[in-house]
Amino acid sequence: MQSEHYSGYRKNFSLILIFIVLISVLFILSLFLAYNFSKKFIENEFVSEKVKVLEESIKPYNEFFQNKVPEISYYNGYLDSATTAKFVDTILKTYPFVSKVIFYDLEVNNGPVRDGLNTGQFSLGPKLVYQFGDLVPMDSVKLFSRDETKKFNHRDDFNALGIKLISYVENLDTTKVPAQDELFTNFSNIRSNKITYLNIPRFEDLKVYKEMLRNKLHPSPVYQQDMLSFHMDPYKIRIINSRPLLYQNIRIEPLTYDPLNTSSEYIATEIALPGPFSDYKLYFISAKSFVDKEIRSYFIPISLVMLLFYSLLVLVAYLIFRNLNINHRMFKLQYDFVNNLTHEFKTPVSVIKIAGNNIKSAASLTERELKMYGKILDEEADKLNGLMNKLLAFTQIENNAIELNQDIVNMEDFIESTIESHNLKHPDFNVTYEVSGFSTFITDPVLLGSLFDNLAENAYKYSRPELKRLHITARLIKGKIVLRFTDQGIGIPAPEINHIFKKFYRIQNQYNQNGSVGLGLAFCKELVNYMSGEISVKSKVNKGTEFKIVLPYNN
C-alpha cells in the first residue's frame, strides 16, 4: 500500500511537472511573440503617427488659409494702408510663420494703365504697393505709387495672379453663379513660401470684366481690387509633438535634405509639408534606445496580463496536485484506520473468544481460574467499551452533539485521581505534578479527564522502559489556565509536528506498529477546541515532548 501511495504521488507529480514545463515554454514563447508584436507595432506607429504630428502642427496654417485669408474679400476692394496695417498686425501676431505681407491696391478700368496688365478695354494695374512685417508690424513701407516715378519692381506676384484672373474671366459662364471653392481657387495663387490672394469681386462685376475683355465699350468704369501677398517662413511653424515618447526630435528641413550620418543607432522618417511649404518636410529622428522605452512601455502591460494568466494556470496545477495528494493521503488514512480499528477490535474479541472456549471446554474450574478468566473478560470488555466510547465521543464532539457541563474541579484532587488510575494500570509509570496560582476552576470534568487520560497514555506508550516519566504543571497565567504535559519519551520528528493532530494519522515508529487508530491526539485537539482552548506541542527527538494546553479560567 505504501509503495502504491508513493507511486501515485510520483505519477501525479510527474504529470503536473510536465504540465508546468509545457505552459512555461508557452509562456516564454508568448512573451517572445508579444515583444516582437510590440516592437513591430511601435515601429509602424513611428511611421504612421507622423501624420497626426503634421496635422497638429499645420492646424494654425489651415485656419489661416481657410478662414483668415478670405476675409480680404469682405472689404470689396476698398482696403487702404491703415486698415491693412491693422489686419496684417493681427495676422503677424497670431500666425508667426507669416514673415511679411505685401499689399497691392489695384484698379480695374477700360483704359491703359501704367505698369499694369492691358487687354483690350480691360486694364488691371497698381495704384499703391505697401510692405508690412519683418521688423515692426504696425509700420509700413511704401514700395510703389502711381503718382511717383519710381519703377514697379514687385511684378511677379501681380503678373501671376493678374493673368490667372484674366484667364478665368475669359472662360467665365455668366449664365450661372460660380461656386465659392471655384472662385477661391482662381483668385489665389500658392507658390513656394508664398500665398497671393486677390479679393473676389461680385458676380455682377465679373460680368462687366468679361464685357470689357470682349472690347465692348463702357462709360469709363473703375473698379477697386485688393491683392495681398503673404510671405511664409516654414521654420517658424510651431511643431506640436503629439507623441513625445515616440519622437525624440522633430525639425523642419528642406525637401532635399539627406543626413550624412546614417548610423544604425537611429531611426528616422519624414513627411512633406503642404501648400506654400511644399519645398520643406518634417524630419523625425529618434535613437533606437529611446524608441525601445516606448516598446517596453507597450510590452509590459501585455506581459503582465500574460504573467497573470500563467500564474493562474500554475495555481490551478498546484491545486490539482494538492487535491490529488490529499485524496491519496485520505485514502491511505482511511485504509490504515480500517486496518487499525479491525486490529483493535480483533485483539480483545479473540481474547474473549479464547477465554470463553476455555471456560466452555473445561470440566470444572478452580476458584483461581474463575477469577483469572473473569478478570480477562472484564479487561477486554473494558477495552472494547473504551474504544467504542472514544469513537462515539469523537463523533459527538465533531458534530457539536454533546453539551458542555460546568462543574467546579479541584485541580490537585483531579490530577491525583488521574495519577492513581494510571499507576494501577502501569505501576512503572512515574507521574509528578505541580499546581500554582489557583486551586479550583469551572469546567467539564469528563472532557478534562479524557484529555488527561489521552496525553498520559501517549506519554507512557512513547517512552522507553527506563524513562516512563511524566510531569504535569497547572498554572494560572494572565487569566488563563496553562497545562503542560512534559515527558522524556522518544520525541516527535520535526516534519511530523504539523500532522500529529490530524485524524487517523500515525507516526511510523517501533512503538506504533500495532498501535492506535490514529485518533488520540486528534481527539485531544477536538476536546480543547470544544472547551474554547488551544493546544500546541514542542518536541525533540530522543529528548522528550511537551504538550501545552491553554484553557479559559472560569471561577
Image (cartoon, rainbow, N blue to C red):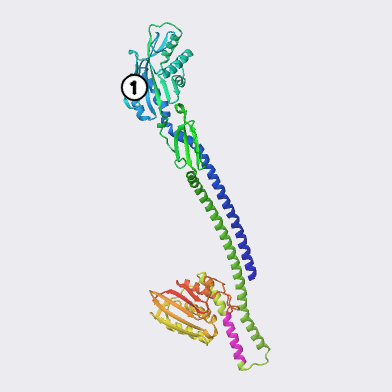
Q: Nearer the viewer, residue 367 or 520?
A: 520
**Residue 509 quadrant:** bottom right
Quadrant, the N terminus: bottom right
Please name the residue that numbered disc 1 is placed on.
84
Quadrant, the C terminus: bottom left
Image spot of residue 268 (x, y percent): 50, 38
Vertical position of residue 223 compared to residue 384: above or below: above
Vertical position of residue 92 compared to residue 1: above or below: above
Q: Main secondary structure of the magenta part?
A: helix
Image spot of residue 477 (x, y percent): 39, 75
Vertical position of residue 207 compared to residue 192: above or below: above
**Label 1 SS:** helix
Residue 553 can be seen in this image: no
Image spot of residue 467 (x, y percent): 52, 84
Mark count: 1
Image spot of residue 504 (x, y percent): 57, 72
Q: Which residues are magenta?
A: 369-384
Looking at the picture, which amino acid does disc 1 mark?
A: Thr
Q: Is residue 493 left or right of residue 152?
A: right
